[in-house]
């Protein structure tokens, strides 16, 4: 099976074992134990409105704060502390605020190392591309609380659309199939199998006759089976034609379950929108994800110092000293407390006096590989194909096409033309020029929308986050084998240790030390946790 | 950014490469993007597969950058870190190359006092992943490594504390990080480096690397990365100390 369709779960690997342990409550046990031993700062599950954080009232209270990195977690810390009267300096190495929250629109710079680009989309409000975070699950209340508090207009983000396609080589003669047909046929054939199995199975608790009737009816409805408990196709798979003024003509069902398991789609992608963070309904800020960054920046009293590279961090019992350099030259900054969301794998590239154990943990971190392609299309041809938002899936490296949730029936549109998860696919894609990446994206799209995809393409861009200047990763993690990039291991011990502040003065924050990798919610969660710890250990005692 | 020929299936690059981001910075002599990977003082960072550059003489850096630009280094399908370096090297003008070489020679690296108290605390919590067998008798490895060096490396690379041999395009390798040394020797042995017929010196390294067994590589890497050799160059010795907390001002305020 193609590895990029499955979450790399080979029995016997450490990850597999950890996941097994996780299923049995392993991480909760690790966490509980860690908390008892005092490794883990108190956890704040509170959104900002109820974040308990006092102003520096007493004479010995820490007041001067430095934040390294103007990614979302850094901005949250800066905002919350400034609101309470702290003096906060935010240092950002790049000339842009927001970290991976990057919305490309006309004129935006994509500063990927080796492939710098300027976005040439048309200048229209709906023609943007969220290069980093692009969707907000309804369960991510920390992000949503800030959106609410800052009155950031949100709209629905359509992540799951059964009218979109699945296409892969050797499946359905290589022709794209509507996801709704795949889903309906799968349920139908599985229901048939389940019914056959019912007669033979010996259940632990024998079914009464009434139970049996109910179960049969349930299975029949589940798969939309006929009176003989056979699957003959269903309206759920959509009509070929008719259904309004003429009777609907059903799609022919697939050949059978053997055909359906012949595409990698059925393994992981089929359940993608049922995974923890991908469940509908999802939201997006109107006009681009960076509206969230803009809202924080607008509320900061002291502007972020962009283009300021931290070169040294010295933590001492009475404060943190930062050595930095920018266009004006090098300088030093003394602060009481430092919060840093700088990518973990880059931190050992500067001078610091962190404990050897901490240095080793940072040394085990690697940038996560992740790439995207954005394409401007001259016509919204997918809308004529009944597709409004959602994702089509391919078996190629570039994997996905996202149809925009904004700009419906408007002029032109921006598609996500490729979203690469797999480690090695990301290596291949990053090693291509942007022109070549776009070519691959067009090839993939042409297989799903023959005759239209390439024809309507106008301009494109691509971001390989593992090559992005000042980031070199879509976050940072602890791979078991850096060459295989087997990320996804929870690495709970490591994250708890890194979140434990050095001398109570230096906090590492960001999604990188959360269990929600690559999500803004993870970034905010760690920011709030660090602030709560700061409150309990530094602020309470000084007042 | 790529623009399509309207109405056709092809794409073509923009006629003029506009300077944005890193290329704009490089053009004004700002080499920050090099230091993102190689460390703020070019001290290297294994976390992003980037070696220290501080020990490398100008001629060697120049020569290798040419290799990345021309494709005789870093273009093998398996050389993932090489791909990144190739991409950025191709954007470097000769001015940028000379500029960054000068910066590498110039840069001063501060030394910091370890946060001892924190170290003692953190020590309790670190789960050691086991010690390498090589740590058990480091001295013996160093001695053995010295013998291997004299037999196999000295002729081209010169004395271990020296500057390498430009005529052989052989850089100084004394002080090289063990991880980087091993990584490169593995690349040579597998033909991932030294793959191009034009790279005669690289091909020579391929034949040397293929004769070295794992023990010899261990001995050599231990010997070369021994603190004895670092910092070998005057410019690389620590000069500055970061001012003690409390007596500094923030000139950017």
Image (cartoon, coloured by chain):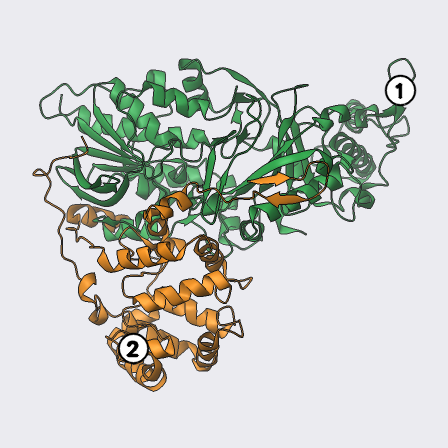
Chain colours: A green, B orange
The residue lying at 23 percent from left, 55 percent from top is B107
Q: Label 1's element?
A: loop
Residue lying furthest front in this view? B15
Residue A1 place in picture, x, y as percent: 68, 52
Q: Could one spot residue B219 in this view of the protein?
A: no
Identify residue for label 1: A242
Frontmost of labels 2 and 1 is 1
Q: Quadrant of the C terminus of chain A?
A: top left
**Residue count near mark 2 (Cα–Cα under 10 Å), binned few <14, some 14–19, many ≥20:** many
Figure quadrant of residue A380:
top right
The residue lying at 44 percent from left, 35 percent from top is A100
Residue A470 place in picture, x, y as percent: 38, 43
Q: Is residue A490 above or below residue A305?
A: below
Residue A419 place in picture, x, y as percent: 59, 40
Q: Could one spot residue B122 in this view of the protein?
A: yes
The residue lying at 18 percent from left, 30 percent from top is B253
- Kindly indicate whether the residue at mark 1 contacts the one at mark 2 (C-beta within 8 angstroms): no
**Residue count near mark 1 (Cα–Cα under 10 Å), binned few <14, some 14–19, many ≥20:** few
Figure quadrant of residue A326:
top left
Identify residue for label 2: B141
Tell me the subunit letter for badge 1: A
**Total marks placed:** 2
Figure quadrant of residue A269:
top right
| Relative horizontal placement of residue B157, taking residue A181 as reference (left or right) | left
Residue B115 place in picture, x, y as percent: 17, 47
């Amino acid at each position: 099976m193609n590895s990029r369709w499955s979450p790399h779960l080979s029995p016997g690997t450490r990850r597999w074992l950890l996941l097994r342990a996780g299923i049995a409550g392993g991480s909760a046990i690790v966490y509980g134990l860690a908390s008892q031993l005092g490794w883990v700062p108190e956890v704040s599950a509170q959104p900002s409105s109820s974040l308990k954080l006092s102003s520096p009232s007493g004479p010995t209270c820490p007041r001067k704060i430095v934040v390294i990195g103007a990614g979302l977690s850094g901005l949250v810390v800066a905002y919350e502390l400034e609101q309470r009267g702290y003096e906060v300096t935010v240092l950002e190495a790049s000339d842009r605020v927001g970290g991976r929250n990057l919305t490309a629109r006309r004129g935006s710079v994509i500063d990927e190392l080796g492939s710098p680009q300027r976005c040439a989309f048309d200048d229209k409000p709906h023609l943007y591309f969220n290069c980093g975070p692009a969707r907000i699950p309804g369960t991510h209340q920390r992000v949503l609380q800030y959106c609410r508090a800052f009155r950031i207009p949100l709209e629905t983000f359509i992540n799951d659309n059964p009218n979109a396609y699945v296409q892969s080589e050797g499946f359905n003669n290589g022709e794209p199939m509507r996801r709704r047909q795949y889903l309906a046929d799968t349920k139908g054939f599985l229901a048939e199998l389940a019914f056959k199995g019912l007669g033979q199975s010996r259940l632990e608790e024998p079914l009464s006759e009434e139970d049996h009737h109910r179960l049969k009816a349930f299975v029949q409805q589940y798969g939309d089976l006929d009176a003989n408990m056979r699957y003959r196709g269903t309206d759920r798979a959509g009509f070929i034609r008719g259904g309004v003024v003429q009777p609907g003509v059903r799609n022919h069902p697939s050949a059978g379950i053997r055909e359906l398991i012949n595409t990698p789609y059925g393994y992981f992608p089929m359940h993608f929108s049922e995974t923890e963070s991908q469940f509908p309904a999802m939201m997006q800020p109107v006009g681009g994800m960076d509206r969230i960054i803009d809202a924080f920046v607008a509320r900061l009293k002291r502007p972020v110092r962009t283009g300021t590279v931290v070169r040294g961090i010295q933590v001492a019992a009475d404060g943190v000293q930062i050595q930095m350099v920018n266009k004006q030259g090098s300088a030093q900054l003394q602060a009481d407390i430092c919060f840093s969301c700088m990518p973990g794998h880059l931190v050992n590239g500067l001078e610091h006096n962190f404990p050897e154990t901490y240095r080793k943990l940072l040394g085990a971190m690697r940038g996560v590989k992740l790439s995207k392609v954005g394409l401007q299309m001259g016509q919204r041809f997918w809308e004529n194909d009944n597709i409004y938002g959602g994702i089509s899936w391919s078996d190629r490296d570039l994997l996905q096409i996202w149809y925009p949730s904004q700009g419906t029936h408007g002029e032109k549109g921006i598609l996500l033309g490729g979203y690469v998860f797999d480690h090695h696919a990301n290596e291949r894609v990053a090693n291509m020029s942007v022109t070549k990446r776009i070519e691959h994206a067009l090839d993939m799209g042409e297989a799903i929308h023959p005759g239209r995809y390439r024809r309507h393409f106008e301009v494109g861009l691509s971001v390989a986050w593992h090559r992005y200047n000042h980031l070199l990763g879509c976050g940072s993690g602890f791979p078991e084998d850096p060459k295989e990039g087997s990320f996804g291991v929870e690495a709970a011990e490591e994250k708890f240790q890194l979140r434990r502040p050095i001398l109570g003065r230096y906090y590492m924050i960001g999604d990188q030390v959360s269990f929600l990798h690559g999500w803004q919610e993870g970034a905010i969660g760690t920011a709030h946790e660090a602030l709560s710890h700061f409150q309990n250990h530094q602020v309470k005692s000084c007042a | 950014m790529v623009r399509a020929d309207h109405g056709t299936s092809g794409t073509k690059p923009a006629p003029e490469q506009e300077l944005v981001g890193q290329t704009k910075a490089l053009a004004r002599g700002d080499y920050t993007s090099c230091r993102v990977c190689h460390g703020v003082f070019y001290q290297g960072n294994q976390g992003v597969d980037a070696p220290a550059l501080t020990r490398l003489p100008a001629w060697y850096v120049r020569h290798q950058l040419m290799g990345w630009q021309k494709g005789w280094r870093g273009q093998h399908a398996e050389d993932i870190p090489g791909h990144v370096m190739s991409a950025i090297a191709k954007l470097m003008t000769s001015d940028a190359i000379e500029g960054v070489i000068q910066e590498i020679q110039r840069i001063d690296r501060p030394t910091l006092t370890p946060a001892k108290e924190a170290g003692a605390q953190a020590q309790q919590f670190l789960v050691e992943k086991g010690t390498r067998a090589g740590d058990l008798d480091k001295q013996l490895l160093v001695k053995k490594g010295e013998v291997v060096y004299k037999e196999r490396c000295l002729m081209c690379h010169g004395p271990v504390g020296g500057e390498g041999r430009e005529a052989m395009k052989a850089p100084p390798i004394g002080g090289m990080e063990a991880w980087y040394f091993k990584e490169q020797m593995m690349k040579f042995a597998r033909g991932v480096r030294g793959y191009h017929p034009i790279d005669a010196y690289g091909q020579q390294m391929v034949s040397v690397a293929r004769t070295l067994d794992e023990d010899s590589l261990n001995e050599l890497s231990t010997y070369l990365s021994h603190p004895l050799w670092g910092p070998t160059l005057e410019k690389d010795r620590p000069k500055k100390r970061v001012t003690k907390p409390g007596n500094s001002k923030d000139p950017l305020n």
